Image (tube, coloured by chain):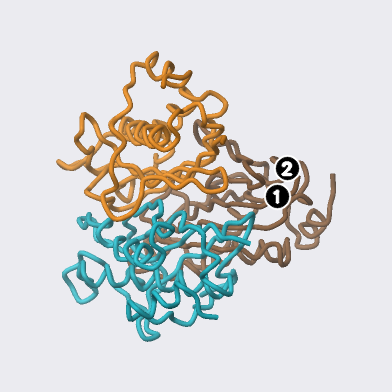
Chain colours: A orange, B cyan, C brown
Amino acid sequence: MTDRIDRKLEELGLTLPQAAAPVASYVPTVLANGMLHISGQLPFKDGALVTGRVGASDDGGVSLEDAQEAAKLCALMLVAQMKAALGTLGRVERIVKLGVFVNSTGDFTDQPKVANGASDLMVALFGDAGKHARSAVGVPVLPLGAAVEIDAIVQVSA
Amino acid sequence: MTDRIDRKLEELGLTLPQAAAPVASYVPTVLANGMLHISGQLPFKDGALVTGRVGASDDGGVSLEDAQEAAKLCALMLVAQMKAALGTLGRVERIVKLGVFVNSTGDFTDQPKVANGASDLMVALFGDAGKHARSAVGVPVLPLGAAVEIDAIVQVSA
Amino acid sequence: MTDRIDRKLEELGLTLPQAAAPVASYVPTVLANGMLHISGQLPFKDGALVTGRVGASDDGGVSLEDAQEAAKLCALMLVAQMKAALGTLGRVERIVKLGVFVNSTGDFTDQPKVANGASDLMVALFGDAGKHARSAVGVPVLPLGAAVEIDAIVQVSA
């Protein structure tokens, strides 16, 4: 089923990834009392995980730009999970909250700029309904070495 | 009061710990709009906190297996808090979300495997109602040196 | 509009800061299904961000006392955001959950004591309605070098 948000994705030249199966024994989404809770999503580009630490100058380092792109890829995966759970993105009433974890060195402090990669996509796709509350923090390491992990709470209509 | 979940705990050879008092000036649980929010729980074994960093090779190091056990102990404490708050575990409708923080070295990237220690217990106890959304991240340190901390959101019936 | 909580603030000698604009492309608060989700707030004192790492002995180090004060400043900013979003603090039914992230060295394990700076303020202001669930974890770095970041979920009346 194609809806307004699907057309917006197309306009933006974006394709939803295959909604990722959990890395472990849990589920990607739980819908309870009208709120969809989405598990932490990792950034995949053409099926490959984007790994590395933002701020590191060695081989495992990720630039700010690449980290923003990783955050956008996490957001795209969040949207893919919404579609898989809801059938249609037309049921998304509001992106309520994003929890953004950035794999960071101890002196990288631009987590908000990284997180904008995700936030900007939500607003580009959903407009005012995409405007969300957010926390963004640095962490020393993420699952499988991912550069960014983002979870979400989304208000949905029946 | 003994219910189905209590019997399942017994079948699994598990005993709920004494629901831990907060380390500080807050409360273990808040029930609001049908959702029980549970404070971050630490892993206690026979009353002693399980401490250490996963991935460290020195004295303070914790193996993957011990970290999984620590996550299971956090989950058991979450269940103890549910019972203390609700009176009976029969009121648990759905484990909605677990937030898993793993005390990790910078090169330990198996946080999902650690978190499975908690996730597997929830499914073993509650079946489909135990299947939850989850985020799992590495952190450099946790309260009192704990190896794992897990908070939760649980949907409950009146 | 002045209400009971405003008077309590005055009694405590506290002034609400200007509700901070987001550092980035998101919004400070989202109200959905009777719950106000507040973005992660940073500690500002007289308009200046309180930065540094708790436990560090060098120039960038923050003492436990200063970190508790920083947590209190985050809480004060959360309250400022509630007032900005709700018009009056009289609509606050319950502080449901605080998520506390403390910029910590790897051997600082008193995150709960730091977080008490925020928890104590909520209880001082809102009484029983201020008693909340909480998680408190260490992180290696926070946006703009902040010492503490706290997000919140608040139950509100119509």
Circle 1 residue:
C156
Disc 1 residue type (three-letter) = Val
Any part of residue C70 in sight: no
> Do the residues under discs 1 and 2 have CB atoms within 8 angstroms?
yes
| 1 vs 2, front mark | 1
Give the Cα separation between the discs numbered 1 and 2. Answer: 8 Å
Q: Which one is in front, C109 or B153?
A: B153
Please, what secondary structure does the residue beneath circle 1 have? Answer: strand
Residue B87 in the image: x percent, y percent? 58, 74
Disc 2 residue type (three-letter) = Leu
- Can you say whether B150 is above or below B25 in the image? above
- Can you say whether A74 is above or below C54 in the image? above
Horizontal arrangement in the rendering, residue B4 relative to residue B27 (left or right): left
Residue B19 in the image: x percent, y percent? 50, 78
Residue A123 in the image: x percent, y percent? 49, 26
Please, what secondary structure does the residue beneath circle 2 have? Answer: helix
Any part of residue B92 in sight: yes
What subunit carries mark 2? C
Residue C86, labelled with which disc? 2
